[in-house]
Image: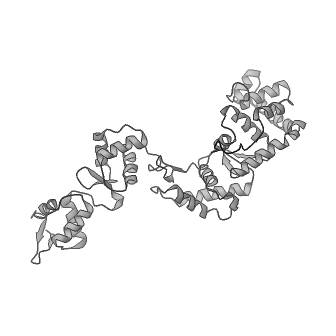
Amino acid sequence: MTTPHQPPLTSFKPKHVTDRLLSVLPERAKDVMVSRYGLGKNTERLTLDAIGKKYKITRERVRQIENHALITIRKSKEYEKERKTFEELEEAVKKLGGIISESDLLKELSKDPSVHNHLNFLLIIGESFKRKKEDDYFQHRWYMDDQLSDKVHTALHKLYENLSDDDLISEQDILQSFLTHLKEVSDEYKKEEILRRWLSLSKAISRNPLGEWGRSASSNVHAKGMRDYAFLVIRKHGSPIHFTEVAKQIEKLFKRKAHVATTHNELIKDPRFVLVGRGLYALSEWGYISGVVKDVIRKILEQNGPMTKSEIVDKVLKERYVKENTIMVNLQNPKFFKKDKDGRYYLV
């Protein structure tokens, strides 16, 4: 985004320019364009049907009037007089990355929402500008260079394909990964602020409230409930954390009400979490073994065969935050464990 210390991207006044361009039209055609693009006091953009009802004509006739008005403006002397205006717009689009989402472009050109419809109208009138409509993968976007547009779209598709549903990566890492798919793009565009704008074109890739990037459909990016928020909290913490602290962090980071008891119940139910101590939870993806201490000992012996007391204690303490005595009490259970003549424990 522009800052107060940066000069404006353009010097013209959008409302004045649109007034001059619209002045070449007959009264009804002018009114149709004002209504269609929200260029009057009422900034709501009326549909073809709504305008048709106003003039008691068909929506197709309104479309014809609109198209004819656009052609008339582009062929007019007023349009020619505004050459500098459109050159400034072209330079602004190029400076912002050559391809940019409609919402980002309008915000960068003006912080005044009342002129956004006028800027949008100028982009539509300008013969250099091309607009691609929003689809399942991308936002509405504007550009001028077809080759650049294709390269950015292709790079975003490849970036998405290289992410798994569970991936979460830092902004710096995703920018570096993005750059690997943009080798044929001019170096003038390889600036962080431009790369971020290009990333925002994608509807398939986005970041979560903690600033980590991944696939938009992933629950790690668009958290849908307490369990997803808890996952992000524990992942951010990076080590086992008590469920009461998980609840506090959910409220702090996501501004969501998190009752301690509810949070604990959700952690118990979800296989993504492992209880590793009294109220302490870790992520199962970190490699912790699930189950109570007895289960952990069993799995360790299954994987390693007979082991000494100290070997078992060392391995269990890597899986659970418990006292050594708790491990020893479990080892004394003859239903599950026995000791051979060498003092090593094995499974019954």
Quarter of the image with the C terminus is bottom left
Quarter of the image with the N terminus is top right
Residue visible at 65% across and 56% down in the picture: 152
Q: Position of residue 82 (x, y in %)?
A: 84, 40
Q: Residue furthest bottom?
A: 342
Asked whether residue 225 appears in the rendered view, the answer is: no
Q: Nearer the viewer, residue 66 or 30?
A: 30
Q: Residue furthest front?
A: 5
Residue visible at 37% across and 53% down in the picture: 237
Left or right of 97 in this view: 284: left
Q: Nearer the viewer, residue 32 or 313?
A: 313
- Give the quarter of the image for residue 6: top right
Q: Position of residue 189 (x, y in %)?
A: 68, 57
Residue visible at 68% across and 52% down in the picture: 97
Q: Position of residue 13 (x, y in %)?
A: 77, 35
Left or right of 199 in this view: 310: left
Left or right of 283 in this view: 332: left
